[in-house]
């Protein structure tokens, strides 16, 4: 029936449903009051955890802040640009998979990415 739910859990749920139906038949009003209060408690706690208020209602009016007057700032003096390096990014070739013969005729510091 439910392949992912273990059989012991299904048996416990079956007993719980049987006990609930038995209690509703014996004391219907008291059982419905308990169920209603449980649902109300669940809704109140869930709402409090989400919004910080116990009961849902209109959002509180926040005090509106006075509009700030724009503050004029003096223009900042630009710093002189630093001299840029010719080649900021260099490619570093490793020795993995290469023979030593090919590396002998190349300068290892001259690998520049463009």
Image: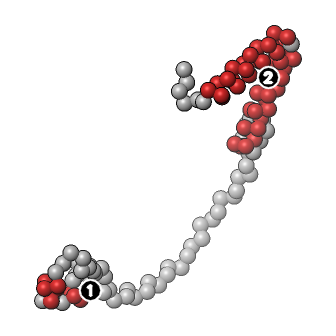
Residue 94 location (% of width, % of height): 26, 79
| Helix, strand or loop at mark 1 | loop
In the rendering, which numbered label is found on residue 86?
1
Instruction: Point out the image quarter for the C terminus.
Output: bottom left
In the rendering, which numbered label is found on residue 35?
2
Residue 60 in view of the camera? no
Q: Quadrant of residue 18?
A: top right
Above or below 103: residue 18:
above
Relative to residue 50, is residue 96 drawn left or right? left
Relative to residue 70, is residue 99 drawn left or right? left
Relative to residue 2, is residue 22 drawn left or right? right
Is 46 in front, or is 51?
Answer: 46
Compare marks 1 and 2 and give the one earlier in the sequence. 2
Query: Local crowd at mark 2 within 10 Å, few (<14), some, or many (≥20)?
Result: few
Above or below 65: residue 55:
above
The residue sitting at 23% across, 89% down in the picture is 109
Above or below 70: residue 57:
above
Above or below 39: residue 48:
below
Is 68 in front, or is 109?
Answer: 109
The residue sitting at 21% across, 75% down in the picture is 97
| Helix, strand or loop at mark 2 | helix
How many dots with numbers? 2
The residue sitting at 62% across, 26% down in the picture is 7
The residue sitting at 54% across, 20% down in the picture is 1
């Amino acid at each position: 029936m439910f392949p992912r739910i273990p059989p012991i859990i299904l048996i416990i749920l079956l007993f719980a449903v049987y006990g609930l139906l038995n209690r509703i038949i014996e004391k219907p009003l008291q059982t419905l009051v308990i169920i209603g209060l449980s649902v109300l408690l669940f809704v109140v706690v869930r709402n409090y955890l989400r919004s910080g208020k116990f009961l849902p209602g209109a959002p509180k009016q926040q005090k509106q802040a006075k509009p700030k007057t724009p503050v004029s700032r003096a223009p900042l003096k630009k710093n002189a640009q630093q001299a840029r390096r010719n080649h900021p990014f260099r490619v570093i070739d490793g020795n993995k998979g290469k023979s030593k013969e090919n590396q002998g005729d190349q300068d290892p510091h001259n690998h520049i990415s463009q």
